[in-house]
Image (cartoon, helix red, strand yellow):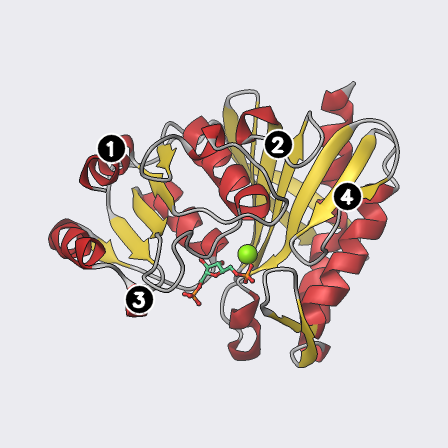
Amino acid sequence: MSGETVQEVFEAVCRVAPHISSGLLKRREYVGEENPSDEKQLEADVWANEFLKEEITSIKGVGQFASEEEKHVTECGDGVSVAIDPLDGSSNIPTNNLVGTIVGIYDEELPCKGRNLISAFYVVYGPLMTLVKAEGGQVNEYVIEKDRKDQVEIHLASEDIEISEPGVYGIGGNKNWTDEMREFESGISQELKLRYGGALVGDVNQVIHQGGLFSYPDRTDAPEGKLRLLFECNPIAYIVENAGGASTDTDRSIMDIEAEELHQRTPFFVGNEELVDRAEERF
Ligand code: AHM
Ligand code: MG
């Protein structure tokens, strides 16, 4: 039953993704409000959230809906809990750099652990619109396209994706790294190529395809880092772990973190197991 709901959520997100992408053009201004994490909201953040919320909450098997852009959980029936980051990396929108959408589907009421995820996926609004989905131990990549009549088509592009051998790395928050982080990064930079784009979806997508490490660690001014556990870290960690990689907050897998608050943050490391283990040993 929940498998059908996962499929419906997946199809709903694929249906609206092209509209979100084309609607960004007119919505690149800040609206003067802040989200629950005290970050400035763009018109695009608010609009994409409303759009996705309408689609997802109307699915019968969805019981709860929560968003990085909303303070509280919305109760909408009986069934799975869906947590979204409608536009991840939205500070990239004014300059037309990469953004995405992240979706986590949990079989438990929110807030809960990442171990309760039954599926997670992200959309990359890049030169191609792609969606990477993990479910049942398998990670697949789809291309979302519109045909000449504006009908949305979903094509399976790669099946059973496994994280590649280490190639690239990206670490956020560099202006406020701890001294330990600076040392750690200096070692990693001797081995891997630096690629940091400022959108979690893009930076993690390249780590899955080219291998390596992504991190947004604790900062001297932000002991829990920047990224939110339920909307960003859990779904991404679930996808990377299902692709044969690993995740950590430096003590445990991201998915074993107790979730106490809807918008809680955590230091975040994902990538090849050997690199994640190295971070766990170092910090
Ligand atoms: P957002 O969801 O509000 O856009 O914030 C999350 C983003 C991540 O995609 C990215 O990894 C990080 O913030 C980038 O932060 P910074 O601008 O500090 O590099
Ligand atoms: Mg985000």
Horizontal side of residue 26 vs 224, given as left or right: right
Three-letter amino acid code at the position of disc 4: Ala
Q: Residues within 10 Å of mark 3 (few under 14, many from 20)?
A: some
Three-letter amino acid code at the position of disc 3: Asn
Three-letter amino acid code at the position of disc 1: Asp
Element at label 3: helix
In whole angstroms, how far apart are the C-alphas of marks 3 and 4? Answer: 39 Å
Q: Residues within 10 Å of mark 2 (few under 14, many from 20)?
A: many
Marked residue nearer the N-terminal end (3 or 4): 4
Residue at the disc numbered 3: 176
Marked residue nearer the N-terminal end (3 or 2): 2
The residue depicted at 56 percent of the width and 36 percent of the height is 259
Element at label 1: helix
Instruction: Give how far across and how far down residue 232 sits, in percent.
Output: 54, 47
Element at label 2: loop
User: Which is more toward the observer, 43 or 260?
Assistant: 260
Residue 277 is marked as 1
Mark 1 or 3, which is nearer the eye? 3
The response on whether ligand 2 sits within 8 Å of label 4 is no
Does the CB distance between marks 3 and 2 fall below 8 Å? no
Choose top left, top right, bottom left or bottom right for residue 171.
Answer: bottom left
Residue at the disc numbered 2: 112
The residue depicted at 23 percent of the width and 42 percent of the height is 283
The residue depicted at 37 percent of the width and 27 percent of the height is 244
Marked residue nearer the N-terminal end (1 or 4): 4
Q: Residues within 10 Å of mark 1 (few under 14, many from 20)?
A: some
Instruction: Give how far across and how far down residue 231 sits, in percent.
Output: 59, 46
Three-letter amino acid code at the position of disc 2: Cys
Mark 1 or 2, which is nearer the eye? 2
User: Which is more toward the observer, 178 or 64?
Assistant: 178
Horizontal side of residue 268 vs 56, given as left or right: left
Residue at the disc numbered 4: 12
